[in-house]
Amino acid sequence: MFAPLLSRLLAERGESGVLVTFNGCRVAIGANLSTTCRHIAEESLVSVATSPASLVFVGTSWDGGPSGLGEAIARLRRAGKEVVLIGPLAPPPYPYASVEARRRAFGHSAPPTELTTSAALDTRYGLAAWQARRDIRFLRPDLVQCRSGRCEYQIDGEPLFSDHAHLSAHALHLFEPQFRAALNGRH
């Protein structure tokens, strides 16, 4: 989701870094049920741990909770990596891009949905505990999405998501201040 933004910011600074996304698998090897995901997670962690990049951005699906993230971060830290953990967003509970396109083109209504709140995300994933850690930098993209307390799927009339789980190109600039702060060593 954040790769284009991160690539641009690193290039502007003349720095290198790695964004680890795990392709829909869990970061923690043992938290993956499928052998394919266990293999992807192990291979990714080994590859990143042995890479020359010292700065590692960890972006993962938070769907199943943060189980095993601490273990993966500890492995990266032992390998001498500075870790930036990207917190969760609240994805829409329906095929957002398709529904929004029909709404705009034909006036169809969006399905009624209860919006998630930033407080609910904090409780569900223990975000305050991650933010309090001093051994990592923790980005809270939910604070951009949920700036009114409710997690919106549009900001200033523009969609945040291009599908059920990926940010639209328009939305990336909204998260730039957080990524710049992380690159400057601030939480």
Image (cartoon, rainbow, N blue to C red):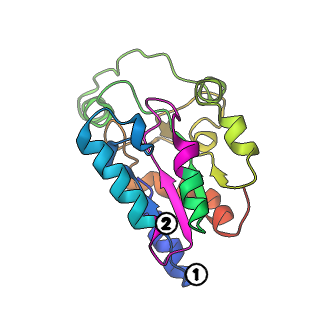
Amino acid of disc 2: Leu
Q: Residue at x 45, y 43 (%)?
A: 28
Q: Which residue, as the protein is rendered here, is positioned at the far bottom?
A: 14
Determine which quarter of the picture holds residue 44.
bottom left
According to the picture, the residue beneath numbered tag 1 turns out to be 13
Q: Quadrant of the C terminus?
A: bottom right
User: What stretch of residues is rendered in magenta?
Assistant: 49-72
Task: Tell me where residue 130 appears, x and y as whole percent.
Answer: 67, 42
Horizontal side, residue 27 vs residue 130: left or right: left
In the depicted structure, whether residue 44 falls above or below residue 159:
below
Horizontal side, residue 4 vs residue 128: left or right: left
Quick check: is 66 in the magenta stretch?
yes
Q: Nearer the viewer, residue 64 or 78?
A: 78
Quick check: is 41 in the magenta stretch?
no
Crowd band around label 2 with a 10 angstrom C-alpha radius: few (<14), some (14–19), many (20+)? many
Horizontal side, residue 46 vs residue 67: left or right: left
In the depicted structure, whether residue 76 falls above or below residue 109:
below
Residue 6: give its label: 2
Kindly state the secondary structure of the residue where label 2 is placed. helix
Kindly state the secondary structure of the residue where label 1 is placed. helix
Task: Tell me where residue 12 appears, x and y as whole percent.
Answer: 54, 80
Amino acid of disc 1: Arg
